[in-house]
Image (spheres, rainbow, N blue to C red):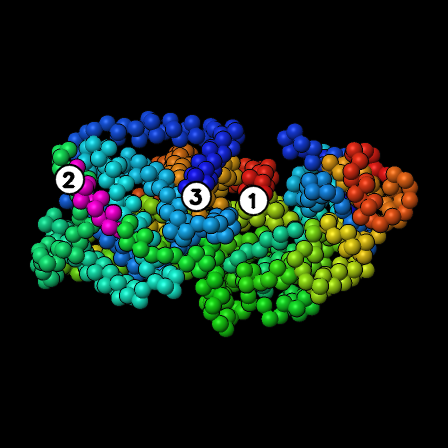
């Protein structure tokens, strides 16, 4: 479960995130949408413990991230839009490393993940030998290794081929079925429509709309049910106001 | 074309300065550096009498030039000197520019570094050189330009040119290599000859006629190098003008030869970091073992003794270090210096003892003071991945401690190897006026103090990187242009200040304890004092670590990742 309450973050005079609150239940996949610079990545960074909010609270699996970061992060997984790797560790060593960090002694989980994600042939490859899709898979494997109950995904499908996209979508759905709370940020609206049960739309750091797909589609000015893209463009072109 | 490239160079420099000086931390740092240059280095601008042995310095300079050239032509360069940065490649390669125009641009872009390097070296190194700073700076500038052109020439001769290039290249490369090998032998022989003249080496006992190297035709092999350094000693202005003119002719010939090359930019490509190159080389190796090399397995089993998740970071850093530089200069020197010390057990080499001890002392001092700058598989390496580090289920203090532990162990390993082997080599040397038992006591005392001192020094470097990340060399990127010497000198300054400040309390504590237990004997006093000093230094390091963890929490991601 992920619970954000009145989150705010400023960079100098710019309000990157302003009074943002939401809650994601176990098994739920929630889409985080917004135009470029709307505050999506900053929000994910605050939820992952990467950036400290100026005010507000974040709780992951019922544990306060700011007060008990170590315990909270143990049940959290985060994949950045540009996954980062250590160029001098091989694929399997990345999994060994992430296992050590989360106190996982056995190698069976890592082996199973390598096999399931099709990284078997690249087991001893260094990150620079991997294609974009393979890198994304490695990032996913490192995150899934400790079986997180809350997962944050920043543009998880960028650069993947159709087969890779399918695999990634299946993995995300499977994790949700296993009870993980998932927050997914993406510009790919078809992905969001396919995977997410609920949406959060940010504009200028504020939550301007939230609800199910149907509710968002119906949140247009004229109240008519439309395509998600049209509704998204309509909602984000209005001046930032309180959530719908 | 020139207009566009000039615009790029000018604007980049201007924007960089403006951006940095808007930040109070960097502005304050800049003022401090300028003040330091003015008050400390500025003194050497005033002409004064020459100091130091001119013969030794000239020889040292020549050896340095010959060896640099030798390595340029005989070993693989870690990065092509003309390699483009990613944005340069994106803009310049598709642009309607001649290949040589791009080369000219790259050469001109390296000029500020060379000018800055020449100024700093002209300030710093005056011993045995001309008393006139302008003369020193100009000579050093000509030398570094010549070396840079030679590096480019070597890279062009050995690396890809367009297929239209002539087929005589392998012959030219072979001739230059043979000449440089001969020059290296002659230069070493000349060095031995000078060492004998000064009583450092007894050549009669060795039985090799080194003095022949000073005669024709052998001395011709090093003639171009002597020409390059000659202006540094010219006694009068006319003599300087004529000698620098000859040196400039050499530079002009090099420049003409370099522009004969037509680099194949597609293959020279984009500048890769040193680690990327090493990784690429590793990637070519087939049949990698999943358990890693013997050293890696040893590291893994050692680190696994620490049953804490944070040890994963230390493990990762140590593995990285063993892969990046398995036989780095540290390990080579740690083994080479004791071998030299052991050689002084042979009577013929005993006159060299003070010289070899000097090398050993200089290397030990370098490891202690400058080691923390160069052993940097810690936060300095990982800060560009700050985002990732912050997602780990560890406290900031645990992360910082694990990062520091890696560098401390690497540095300590080198120091202890040097200390142990050197002590063993000197233990029964009749020339050393210290009893074996006392020598062991000294060695043990040093070993007690080292971990704490290393921890403080490396913490100091990491704090510097956290406070002024733009001035620190972070990740696998190598500092470029004028940032490079600036970073190193400033880091060195920080290392010295941190070391001096941090040693005060442990030294006082050690002195007090040593005095208190002195009735029990000198050996007990020395060891007790060292243990207390080591513990006090570790205590200081723990305090510093707390502060570092706070800084780690506050550091802005954009300042270290470039986002």
Asked if both marks, 2 and 3, belong to the same chain, the answer given is yes
User: Label for residue B561?
Assistant: 1
Instruction: Chain letter for mark 2, please.
Output: B
List x then y, in percent, for residue A127.
Answer: 56, 60
Tell me how far mark 1 sits from mark 2, CA to CA: 50 Å
List x then y, in percent, for residue B48.
Answer: 19, 29
Residue at figure coordinates x 47%, y 50% from the top left: B96
Q: Secondary structure at mark 3?
A: loop
Type of secondary structure dominating the magenta stretch? helix
Instruction: Chain letter for mark 1, please.
Output: B
Locate the C terminus of chain B by quadrant: top right
Question: Where does label 2 land, which residue?
Answer: B242
Residue at figure coordinates x 60%, y 71% from the top left: A121
Q: Which residues are magenta?
A: B241-254
Residue at figure coordinates x 74%, y 63% from the top left: A166
Marks 2 and 3, the one that precedes in the sequence = 3
């Amino acid at each position: 479960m992920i619970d954000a309450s009145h989150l705010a973050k400023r960079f100098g005079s710019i309000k990157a995130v302003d009074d943002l609150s939401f809650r994601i239940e176990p098994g739920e996949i929630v889409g985080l949408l917004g135009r470029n610079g709307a505050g999506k990545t900053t929000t994910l960074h605050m939820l992952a413990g990467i950036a400290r909010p100026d005010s507000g609270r974040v709780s992951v699996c019922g544990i306060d991230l700011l007060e008990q970061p170590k315990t909270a992060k143990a049940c959290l997984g985060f994949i950045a839009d540009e996954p980062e790797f250590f160029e001098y560790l091989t694929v399997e060593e990345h999994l060994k490393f992430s296992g050590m960090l989360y106190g996982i002694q056995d190698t069976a989980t890592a082996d199973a993940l390598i096999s399931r994600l099709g990284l078997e042939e690249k087991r001893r490859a260094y990150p620079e030998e991997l294609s974009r899709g393979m890198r994304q898979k490695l990032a996913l494997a490192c995150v899934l290794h400790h079986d997180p109950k809350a997962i944050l995904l920043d543009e998880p499908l960028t650069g993947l081929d159709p087969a890779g996209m399918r695999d990634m979508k299946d993995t995300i759905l499977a994790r949700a079925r296993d009870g993980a709370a998932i927050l997914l940020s993406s510009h790919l609206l078809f992905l969001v429509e396919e995977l997410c049960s609920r949406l959060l739309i940010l504009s200028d750091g504020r939550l301007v709309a939230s609800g199910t797909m149907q509710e968002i589609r119906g949140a247009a000015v004229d109240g008519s049910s439309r395509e998600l893209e049209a509704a998204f463009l309509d909602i984000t072109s209005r001046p930032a106001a309180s959530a719908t | 074309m020139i207009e566009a490239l000039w615009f790029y160079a000018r604007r980049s420099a201007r924007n960089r300065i403006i951006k940095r000086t808007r930040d109070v931390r960097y502005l304050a740092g800049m003022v401090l550096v300028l003040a330091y240059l003015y008050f400390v280095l500025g003194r050497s601008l005033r002409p004064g009498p020459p100091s130091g042995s001119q013969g030794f310095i000239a020889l040292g300079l020549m050896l340095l030039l010959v060896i640099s050239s030798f390595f340029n032509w005989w070993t693989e360069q870690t990065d092509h000197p003309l390699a483009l940065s990613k944005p340069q490649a994106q803009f310049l390669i598709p642009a309607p520019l001649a290949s040589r125009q791009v080369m000219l641009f790259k050469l001109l872009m390296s000029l500020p570094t060379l000018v800055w390097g020449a100024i700093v070296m002209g300030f710093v190194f005056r011993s045995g050189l001309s008393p006139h700073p302008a003369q020193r700076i100009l000579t050093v500038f000509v030398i570094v330009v010549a070396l840079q052109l030679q590096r480019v020439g070597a890279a062009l001769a050995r690396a890809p040119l367009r297929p239209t290039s002539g087929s005589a290249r392998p012959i030219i490369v072979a001739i230059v290599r043979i000449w440089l090998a001969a020059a290296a032998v002659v230069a070493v022989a000349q060095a031995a000859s000078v060492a004998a003249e000064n009583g450092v080496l007894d050549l009669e006992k060795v039985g090799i006629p080194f003095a022949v190297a000073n005669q024709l035709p052998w001395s011709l092999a090093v003639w171009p190098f002597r020409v390059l350094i000659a202006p540094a000693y010219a006694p009068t202005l006319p003599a300087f003008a004529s000698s620098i003119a000859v040196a400039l002719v050499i530079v002009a010939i090099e420049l003409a030869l370099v522009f004969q090359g037509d680099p194949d930019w597609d293959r020279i490509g984009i500048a890769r970091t040193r680690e990327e190159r090493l990784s690429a080389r590793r990637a070519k190796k087939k049949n990698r073992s999943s358990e890693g090399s013997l050293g890696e397995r040893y590291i893994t089993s050692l680190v696994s003794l620490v049953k804490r998740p944070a040890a994963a970071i230390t493990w990762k850093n140590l593995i990285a270090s063993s892969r990046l530089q398995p036989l780095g200069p540290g390990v080579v020197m740690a083994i080479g210096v004791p071998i030299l010390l052991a050689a002084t057990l042979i009577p013929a080499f005993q006159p060299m003892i003070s010289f070899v001890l000097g090398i050993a002392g200089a290397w030990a001092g370098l490891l202690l003071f400058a080691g923390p700058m160069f052993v940097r598989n810690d936060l300095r390496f990982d800060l560009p991945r700050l985002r990732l580090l912050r997602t780990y289920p560890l406290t900031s203090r645990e992360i910082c401690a694990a990062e520091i532990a890696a560098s401390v162990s690497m540095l300590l390993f080198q120091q202890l190897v040097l200390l142990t082997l050197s002590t063993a080599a000197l233990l029964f040397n009749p020339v050393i006026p210290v009893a074996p038992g006392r020598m062991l006591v000294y060695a043990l005392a040093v070993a007690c103090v080292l971990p704490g001192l290393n921890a403080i020094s490396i913490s100091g470097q990491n704090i510097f990187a956290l406070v002024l990340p733009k001035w620190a060399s972070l990740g696998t990127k190598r500092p470029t242009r004028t940032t490079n010497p600036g970073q190193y000198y400033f880091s060195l300054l920080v290392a010295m200040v941190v070391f001096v400040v941090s040693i005060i309390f442990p030294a006082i504590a050690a002195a007090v304890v040593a005095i208190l237990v002195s009735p029990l004997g000198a050996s007990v006093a020395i060891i007790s004092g060292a243990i207390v000093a080591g513990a006090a230094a570790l205590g200081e390091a723990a305090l510093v670590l707390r502060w570092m963890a706070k800084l780690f929490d506050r550091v802005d991601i954009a300042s270290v990742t470039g986002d």
